[in-house]
Amino acid sequence: MKHRVLQIGPITPPADARLARDYDIAPLWKQPDPAAFLAEHGAEFEGIVVHVRDACDASILESLPNAKVIANFGVGYDKIDVDTAKRLGIQISNTPQVLDGCVADLAMGLAIDVARGISTTDRFVRAGGWKSGQRPLMTRVHGKNMGLLGFGGIGQAVGRRAAGFDMTVRYNTRRPVEGFAGQHVASLVELAKWADFLVVACPGGAQTRHLVNAEVLDALGPRGILVNIARGSVVDEAALVRALQEGRLGGAGLDVFENEPNVPEALLAMDNVVALSHIAGFTRESRADMEALVCDNLDAYFRTGRVLTPV
Ligand code: 8YV
């Protein structure tokens, strides 16, 4: 007998195929009336599988009295109501580590792009601008100060790469991370004052909402560059737009936004902004590893009672 599992939204074709092969999957997104479906069938499900973009809120969790595991496709889990899941005794797994390197690669790419003007110079060359002039001088990356907001797997991977660029690295977290206490800065504003580049690499969700506010952006200053590869919610986007418009911030490299896929027009009009479409984890390699890990977590739970990578 296959375990009955509720799948909230599609993951990827390979992951969906493996899940459908190994479990009795109910695709919630295909139900014409999801709430009515949950009211009628909720008690059948032993587990839940969810894509990082889809909400897994209290109303869903409370309609599944027999579900004891959530396997989340993604390292972030800000759309899962963790408190409710814990109260109901539901284990949660995510997909850490397997995308850290790719996300960190992209963070460095954004930092270098904004500092050196790669994207904007590409547009300049394509438009024929080189035939009649040259781009303005930009700013160097190596030897500069990199501040990291968040110092988990992704933050540390960015830090290692930055060290390879001869940058000095410091980070801000609630508590110093063992082995790196010397680099810890207790105040985000102080970190931003010191940093040339501030990279947002902390989880999203209510606890970190708008941590990067006008005060932090002003501390980073007119030559500072903000890079966000975490969640749009961590940055006060309206304050970011104002700081850039008023020249109080040097530039921004953004893979994530507050209201994806909507990017404020004001940001798109600025040459000192590089805007991407939440692609930090989008490589064939990390995607395949994430697909395997989301399924492996579910398998491990049903085999041993414990997920492999708990939240
Ligand atoms: C997702 C992400 O993997 O894992 C996360 O938390 O934010 C992303 O890199 C991606 O959006 C899934 O399609």
Image (spheres, rainbow, N blue to C red):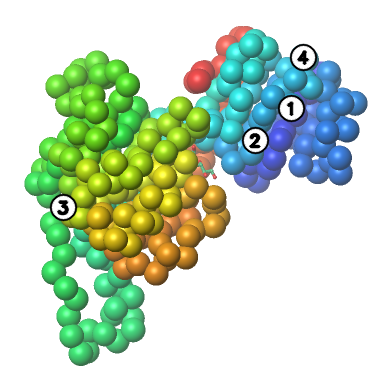
Are the residues tagged 2 and 1 within 8 Å (C-beta)?
Answer: yes
Q: CA–CA distance between discs 2 and 1?
A: 9 Å
Location of residue 25 (image quadrant) = top right
Q: CA–CA distance between discs 4 and 1?
A: 12 Å
Are the residues tagged 3 and 1 within 8 Å (C-beta)?
Answer: no
Earlier sequence position, callout 3 versus callout 1: 1
Residue under numbered circle 3: 141
Residue drawn where x is 77% and y is 14% of the image:
66
Disc 2 marks which amino acid? Ala
Of 107 and 225, the residue lying toward us: 225
> Image height check: is 148 above or below 1?
below
- At mark 3, the secondary structure is loop
Disc 1 marks which amino acid? Ile
Residue under numbered circle 1: 60
Q: CA–CA distance between discs 4 and 2?
A: 19 Å
Q: CA–CA distance between discs 3 and 2?
A: 38 Å
> Image height check: is 122 above or below 256?
below
Q: CA–CA distance between discs 4 and 3?
A: 53 Å
Residue under numbered circle 2: 55
Residue drawn where x is 16% and y is 73% of the image:
136
Of 246 and 141, the residue lying toward us: 246
Residue drawn where x is 25% and y is 65% of the image:
117
Checking the image for residue 66, the label placed there is 4
- At mark 1, the secondary structure is helix
| Left or right: residue 10 compared with residue 124 | right
> Badge 3, how many Cα within 10 Å: few under 14, some, many 20+?
many
Earlier sequence position, callout 4 versus callout 2: 2
Disc 4 marks which amino acid? Asn
> Image height check: is 253 above or below 184?
below
Earlier sequence position, callout 4 versus callout 3: 4
